[in-house]
Amino acid sequence: MASSTVSFIIIIITTVLLPSLSSQLSDLFPSNNPPPFLGKHSHPIKQPNHHQQYRYETRYFSQPLDHFSFLDLPRFRQRYLINTEHWVGPSRSGPIFLYCGNEGDIEWFAVNTGFVWDIAPRFGAMILFPEHRYYGDSMPFGSREEAYRNATTLSYLTAEQALADFAVLITDLKKNLSAEGCPVVLFGGSYGGMLAAWMRLKYPHIAVGALASSAPILQFEDIVPPETFYNIVSNSFKRESSSCFDTIKNSWNALRSEGQKEDGLKQLSKTFHLCRELTSVQGLSDWLDSAYSYLAMVNYPYPSNFLMPLPGHPIREVCKKIDGSPAGSSILERIFNGVSVYYNYTGEVDCFQLDDDPHGMDGWNWQACTEMVMPMSSDQNTSMFPAYDWDYSAFREGCQRDFQVTPRPRWITTEFGGHDIEHVLKSFGSNIIFSNGLLDPWSGGSVLKNISETIIALITKEGAHHIDLRASSTEDPDWLVEQRATEIKLIQGWIYNYSKKMKATFEI
């Protein structure tokens, strides 16, 4: 029997039920879920056709466990993927394109970042995909089990350590290849885009520029309203169909009411074709939230297989299923018909499994509980999700319970900035492209306007989650072709200016 295994990690908090509808529903929608980034969808690439499309060599580099102390700690092997097929070499100052590895298996990100592979030949560039520590094969302490054992072993999983890994790796590699004069251009999408932007700011001598796609570097503290993410998700559905929006908004109450009935959980399991009977409504609620959020992120104008096999304009297709359900269908039957577009577009799945990680622990949960604290809320008037406020106290208690760690909600802005971003970037930053599609719910936490002549915001009205980093296709709309052309021109400018300065320095 086929099953669709969907990984959506949750941290359950204790809530006090109040008489209001929004409070009654808050237990279905806890305010301290980790942000829905892409790492849970990453997986090792085993299909040979991917290796034929993107050829690379897999190597390993010995990294310090802690870059910021001088303790005699064990090292670990960081995996990285490298392609030098089109590199023109150090004699011609061939550039190095470095993708900042995300929260998952690096091969998955490599084969889903076709833009870098597409443009490398015209630049004569080397391609480098270093893996983020604690993900994929880059596990400290020898194994995932040991690396994830407790707060002590996980304490080296931070964005700062990851950036230092990238910096040490590229510095060593350039030295070994006598390529110290070769410019490095950073790329990244989502969390990887945040890392690319931060690396350009923290290590300006390492890289000449960064393309930070769908990088929500402002999704911290109170820099953007906490309801921004779910408002954008909701608007993506509402713009397709107001009745679809209303059905989803009303479904949470129907879900909760059904779950309270004597055989309600059994009936819900049957309605949603689950492989195992529910023990609570919570898991199903998060399964649905996950589908809506990821649909908004990958609401591409053409068919894709990024997270799931999906049609073009998938939210449109979901709403068609919800609105076009047979007469007499219950609200929850309509919801099932809709989310089946996301979870079972191929029609090959017989039953659905809500979660393949019974322990609810992964690296991203740790990061969300320590420094990647991104406040989220849902507005009763503008969101199709149950209303709730950001509750840092409950969030902190959950992290203390699950990881024995207290979050540092202000650390990211202390380490990398975020407040008064326009003034700071204008004064201290250069050569960063912040690209965003306004359909992407993460766009609300990114930089959406030009800061200076070299800190550029490229905004597309119909774009979704780092669509510009996807491989080019004959189905690409004109606006996407134009966006990529602009990015290429800007990158050419960075490399040209770098070469010009290097030549002037050499002549002196």
Image (cartoon, rainbow, N blue to C red):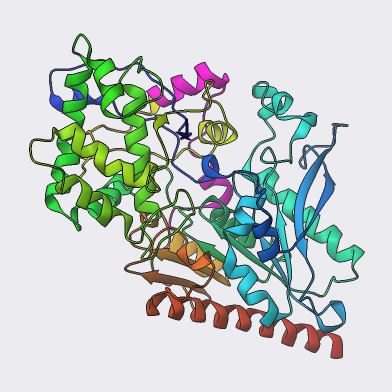
Q: Residue furthest front?
A: 1
Q: Is residue 506 visible?
A: yes
User: From this viewpoint, is residue 381 visible?
Assistant: no
Residue visible at 52% across and 43% down in the picture: 41
Instruction: Please indicate whether residue 146 sits to the left or right of residue 440 in the image.
Output: right
Residue located 35% across and 18% down the image = 278
Q: Position of residue 364 (x, y in %)?
A: 55, 36
- Marks counted in the figure total 0
Q: Residue 205 location in percent, x, y?
A: 73, 66
Residue 502 vs 434, above or below: the answer is below
Q: Based on the displayed image, in which of its 4 quarters is residue 89 positioned?
A: bottom right
Q: Position of residue 129 (x, y in %)?
A: 70, 57
Point out residue 12 in the picture as x, y percentages from the top left corner: 40, 21
Range shown magenta? 394-420
Is residue 266 shown left or right of residue 478? left
The answer to whether 91 appears left or right of 339 in the picture is: right
Residue 448 or 428: which is nearer the viewer?
448
Q: Which image quarter: residue 268?
A: top left
* Residue at 46% across, 67% down: 435
396 in the magenta segment:
yes
Foreground of the two, 220 or 256: 256
From the viewer's side, name the closer residue of 259 and 492: 259
Q: Is residue 291 magenta?
A: no
Q: Which residue lies most toward the top here?
A: 262
Of the 4 image quadrants, the one containing the C terminus is: bottom right
